[in-house]
């Protein structure tokens, strides 16, 4: 399936947006301040602002977006421009996909995570009943506009969180980019030239999604790190030391690599190299006090079959298997090893 065009912009000039449509802009309380002013004004624009953060990726916020669209008389000839991180892109995409049975939308990702991952591939949605992305729809944006200069105001912790999804793309499909990261490790974050790093990550996502847009098969490799990651993210959401999405995915990739190693799916040296990069770059690795609770949360994962958690596991750097069933004992052993060897109190 044809994927949405990706435009790497040098500036956010008004020519990037369709002039014939009534424009609605969705931002959060940070992107309205840091990113919206960068965008050249054109005509009347209806701006909608939602609170920032994963805890607001819910039905209440979505309802407010629908209400704002209705109050501004949005119709089938309107376009919703989502300017923000993965939360704004996911909620805005879902609002557009459902409002009047679907209006056009454009993704303008402003975090590294959204530029590399969330804005592409047509998955939209919200969290529900304490589960990640429980409600949602597949809907492709008209285009995705990537303007790496937005990253200048992004806090370092958010930048690192996004880098987890970049590395994930390399681990599952691009060994040579992974080895470049391995050589430079943390340095790459400090001195990154984001455009080429993003181009490679986006190309991987687009080509996988084009082969399997509705995640019946190969697209599941993009979920590497996410079976554990989503469950861990959900559990920490209400905690004071909550985890960002990419931080949870990094912990998930680490544990799922340990599982692949124990199952002898991946050679020890390759697994060790993945783990080495992950622990060098991602330092927020709290111990998981209650693995049984995480296991329970995993049973609600969308990737499951009959409530049996399924995993995407790398079989070498640059390649990944999917639909892997893993015995509970192996999962619990990965938690134990993670807690003992890699968690930072
Ligand atoms: P986010 O959207 O919460 O953004 C992180 C924080 O950075 C927020 O506080 C935001 O206001 C702020 N921010 C955004 N851009 C900024 C900028 N340029 N300068 C300063 N502050 C800025 O989080 P995220 O990490 O971008 O996205 C995580 C979400 O993405 C999760 O909900 C996850 O489930 C989703 N996701 C979706 C897909 C998909 O395919 N749809 C893929 C991966 C992740």
Image (cartoon, helix red, strand yellow):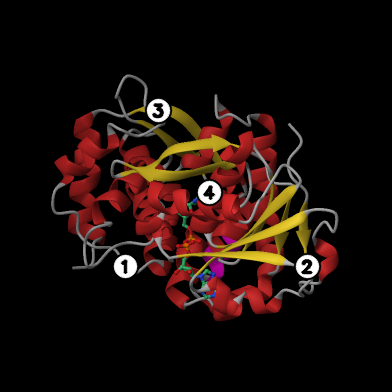
**Circle 2 or circle 3, nearest the eye:** 2
Find numbered disc 2 in the image and state the secondary structure of the residue it sits on: loop
Query: What secondary structure characterizes most of the magenta part?
Result: helix
In the picture of the structure, the residue carrying the numbered disc 1 is: 284
Image label count? 4
Front residue of 99/326: it is: 99
Q: Nearer the viewer, residue 75 or 285?
A: 75
Does label 4 or label 1 sit earlier along the sequence? 4
Mark toward the viewer: 4 or 2? 4
The residue pinned by badge 4 equals 66
Above or below: residue 331 compared with residue 275: above
Query: Residue at position x 29%, y 24% from top?
Result: 307
Residue 54 in which image quadrant: bottom left
Query: Is residue 187 rendered to the left or right of residue 6?
Result: left
Q: Quadrant of residue 208?
A: top right
Q: Say which of marks 3 and 1 sits in front.
A: 1
Q: Which residue is mark 3?
A: 324
Q: Earlier in the sequence, mark 2 or mark 1?
A: 2
4 and 2 marks in contact (CB < 8 Å): no
Which of disc 1 and disc 3 is earlier in sequence? 1
The residue stretch that appears in magenta: 179-184
């Amino acid at each position: 399936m044809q994927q949405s065009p990706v435009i790497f912009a040098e500036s956010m000039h008004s020519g990037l947006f369709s002039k014939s449509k009534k424009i609605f802009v969705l931002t959060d309380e940070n992107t309205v301040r840091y990113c919206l002013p960068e965008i050249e004004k054109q005509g009347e624009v209806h701006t909608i602002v939602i609170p920032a953060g994963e805890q607001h990726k819910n039905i209440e916020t979505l309802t407010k977006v629908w209400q704002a669209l209705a109050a501004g008389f949005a119709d089938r000839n309107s376009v919703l421009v989502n300017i923000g991180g993965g939360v704004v892109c996911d909620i805005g995409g879902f609002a557009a996909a459902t409002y009047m049975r679907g209006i056009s939308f454009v993704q303008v990702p402003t975090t590294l995570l959204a530029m590399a991952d969330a804005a592409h591939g047509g998955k939209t949605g919200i969290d529900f009943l304490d589960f990640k992305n429980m409600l949602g729809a597949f809907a492709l944006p008209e285009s995705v506009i990537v303007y790496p200069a937005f990253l200048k105001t992004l806090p370092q912790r958010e930048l690192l969180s996004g880098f987890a999804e970049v590395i994930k793309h390399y681990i599952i499909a691009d060994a040579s980019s992974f080895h470049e990261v391995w050589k430079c490790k943390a340095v790459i974050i400090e001195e990154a030239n984001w455009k080429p790093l993003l181009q490679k990550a986006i190309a991987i996502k687009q080509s996988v999604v084009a082969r399997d847009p509705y995640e019946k098969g190969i697209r599941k490799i993009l979920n590497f790190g996410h079976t554990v990651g989503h469950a861990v993210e959900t559990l920490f959401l209400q905690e004071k030391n909550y985890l960002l999405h990419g931080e949870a995915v990094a912990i998930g990739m680490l544990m799922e690599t340990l599982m692949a190693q124990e199952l002898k799916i991946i050679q020890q040296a390759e697994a060790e190299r993945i783990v080495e990069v992950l622990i060098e770059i991602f330092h927020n690795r709290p111990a998981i006090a209650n693995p049984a609770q995480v296991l329970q949360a995993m049973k609600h994962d969308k990737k499951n079959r009959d409530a049996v958690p399924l995993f995407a596991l790398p079989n070498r750097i640059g390649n990944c298997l999917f639909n892997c069933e893993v015995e509970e004992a192996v999962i619990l052993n990965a938690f134990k090893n993670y807690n003992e060897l890699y968690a930072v109190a």
